[in-house]
Amino acid sequence: MQDTELYQQILGIGTPWEVSNVDLNMELGEIVVSVRHAQGTKFCCPQCDQKLSCYDHSPSRRWRHLDSCQFKTMLEASIPRVDCPEHGVKLVQVPWSSPNSRFTLMFEAFAIRLLKATQTIEGARTILRTGWEATWTILERAVERGQARKQSSPLPHIGIDEKSFKKGQNYITLIYDLDNSTVEAISEGHNKEAANECFSQLLPGQIETVEAIAMDMSSAFVNAAKSNIPLAETKIVHDRFYVMKLVNEAVDKVRKQENKRLRSEGDDTLTGTRYLFLKNYDNLKESSQQRLDALFSFKLETGKAWTYKEMLRDLWHHDTAKEAKEFFRWWYRKVIHTRLEPMKKVARTIKTRIDNVVSYCTFSGISNGVAEGINSKIQSIKRRVGGYRNRQNYKTAIFFYCGGLDLDP
Ligand SMILES: [Zn+2]
């Protein structure tokens, strides 16, 4: 078999295209495969598909293809242009590459698999021997392609959430599909406008299919849901993840205040104990459990706050909203009669939104685990975010890794 014929088969190139020459440059470690088309071939206008004769050719161009053994392999061709009566002189579409790409489709498909496997631009580009920008462009184009292909499928259970790009600043707002664990929309900021922008990114018809929406208790998200989703008030669920996060923050405030007071009296009992009070007791190591147990003998305010926090976990163990609400009333009365101001504040916040907390009983499809799962996935993208250079890239990377998109060329 001739090398031209061999490459024709490897590249999957067929009529009207054929491999005319294969050139191995040992010095550069490069193979250049030249491709040309048969004389007299008619090509389609890329805009209207009308079949037209070849008008002229662009200067010869190269596309990076998958390596042949250790050799970088380039495909080389002059792209024909057609003169469409309607659209003017246009470059025709070649079967081995996307318009404006410097890579063949097979190379891009391989790069996408590597980007997924290595989880970083740096990791993929080291194996591919490509530049950072070029590798990023492949990822970006894959996301564009995936989003263009997206269909308006029903979204019965969604979540809306915020994430910070850098610690405590530069927020983004996201909408999750809780049934498929995917990110459906992302916008800048975390106010009502950001949430509105997120809802507007959903495809036509999807808003109407929402049956339940999980979110924290911030008024920004509640108000945005109300102005975007029909009958939102009956669909909002402030799930355990968000409620317990607030309660944990309140416990930490109590601890900080008490620690400050104790230290001013020369007592550092509470110093370095933050994580003991924040974690779920069952998730602590035995030694940490013992340390926490010992702290309780001091009759600390923090210990009381922690106990109320742990008690509140039972709110999510009821079968009906009515029972859950009764439990909350009991818990609320206990907390409100203490002097634990941060706990009282959070108890009042929950009370105003209690109907949308106990609504978890109605919506079994709203599961905590999912939001937490997507959260940790996004968190790990953020950890590699130095490699993504800016916030726009961060968003694109989230869609690439969590968008559930069809990315293949
Ligand atoms: Zn045309």
Image (tube, rainbow, N blue to C red):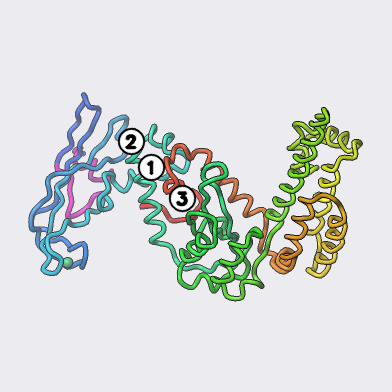
From the image, tell me which residue sits under label 2.
Answer: 130
Three-letter amino acid code at the position of disc 2? Thr
State which image quarter holds ligand 1: bottom left
First along the sequence among labels 3 and 2: 2
Viewer-proximal residue among 89 and 44: 89
Q: In this view, does 232 lie to the left or right of 68?
A: right
- Tag 1, which secondary structure? helix
Q: Which of marks 1 and 2 is in front?
A: 2
Q: Where is residue 202 in the image (x, y as percent from the top left)?
A: 48, 65
Q: In this view, does 163 lie to the left or right of 258?
A: left
Viewer-proximal residue among 324 and 131: 324
Viewer-proximal residue among 110 and 166: 166
As drawn, 225 above or below 172: below
Q: Can residue 287 be seen in this view?
A: no
Q: Is residue 132 left or right of residue 34?
A: right
Q: Position of residue 219 (x, y in %)?
A: 62, 62
From the image, tell me which residue sits under label 1.
Answer: 111
First along the sequence among labels 1 and 2: 1
Residues at discs 1 and 2 in contact (Cβ within 8 Å): yes
In magenta, the rendered stretch is: 2-20
Q: Nearer the viewer, mark 3 or mark 2?
A: 3
**Distance between the alpha carbons at the discs numbered 1 and 2:** 10 Å
Three-letter amino acid code at the position of disc 1? Ala
Q: Position of residue 21 (x, y in %)?
A: 15, 39
- Tag 3, which secondary structure? helix
Q: Residue 395 carries which label?
A: 3
